[in-house]
């Protein structure tokens, strides 16, 4: 199971049927709960940009962390681990999740305390 903030490539072919691809880059926000990292900005995903200059796994292009929906993937679907998001970007995730109108309260209540603990432990 990945640690919070770890970025992994996951086989999503059984979970996200509308996608044309079978693999997706995701950031871990809790036990087997992830946010997707997309190539392009889409306002509907309430995303924010992460810079390729800060992450070797993004080279050569900036990407966008989608904060409008969390996905559950079993750990056995992880194909490879590619890095971790920095503390500043994890703070942005917490802020986006706290202010999200699309995330359910139960999802927020199950993940945000764990993310805040991670932030406190990783100052």
Image (cartoon, helix red, strand yellow):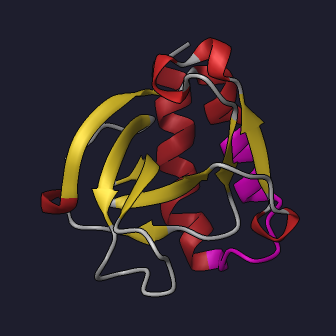
Q: Is residue 24 above or below residue 25?
A: below
- Image coordinates for residue 5, horizontal then vertical, percent: 45, 35
Q: Nearer the viewer, residue 36 or 93?
A: 36
State yes or no: residue 29 in magenta: no
Q: Position of residue 18 (x, y in %)?
A: 51, 86
Query: Does 39 sit above or below residue 17?
Result: above
Apparent side of residue 107 relative to residue 22 in the rendered image (left or right): right
- The outermost residue toward the right is 43
In-front residue for pair 118/103: 103
Q: Which image quadrant is residue 97 in?
A: bottom right
* Vertical comparison of 38 with 63: above or below: below
The residue at 30%/56% (across/down) is 10
Nearest the eye: 8 or 109: 8
Instruction: Describe residue 69's horizontal placement relative to residue 80 as left or right.
Output: right
Residue 49's spot in the image, x, y percent?
A: 76, 38
Query: Is 62 displayed left or right of 110 in the figure?
Result: right
Q: Residue most toward the left?
A: 76
Range drawn in magenta: 92-105
Q: Residue at x 47, y 32 (%)?
A: 118
Whether 94 is among the magenta residues is yes
Quarter of the image where the C terminus is located: top right
Q: Residue at x 57, y 77 (%)?
A: 106
Q: Where residue 113 sits: x, y (%)?
A: 54, 50
């Amino acid at each position: 199971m990945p640690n919070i903030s770890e970025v992994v490539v996951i086989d999503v072919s059984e979970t996200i049927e509308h996608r044309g691809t079978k693999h997706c880059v995701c950031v871990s926000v809790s036990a087997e709960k992830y946010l997707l990292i997309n190539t392009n900005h889409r306002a509907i995903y309430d995303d924010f940009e992460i810079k390729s200059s800060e992450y070797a796994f993004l080279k050569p292009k900036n990407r966008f962390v989608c904060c409008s929906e969390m996905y559950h993937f079993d750990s056995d679907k992880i194909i490879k681990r590619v890095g971790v998001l920095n503390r500043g970007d994890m703070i942005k995730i917490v802020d986006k999740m706290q202010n999200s109108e699309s995330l359910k309260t139960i999802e927020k209540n199950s993940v945000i305390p764990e993310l805040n603990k991670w932030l406190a432990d990783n100052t």
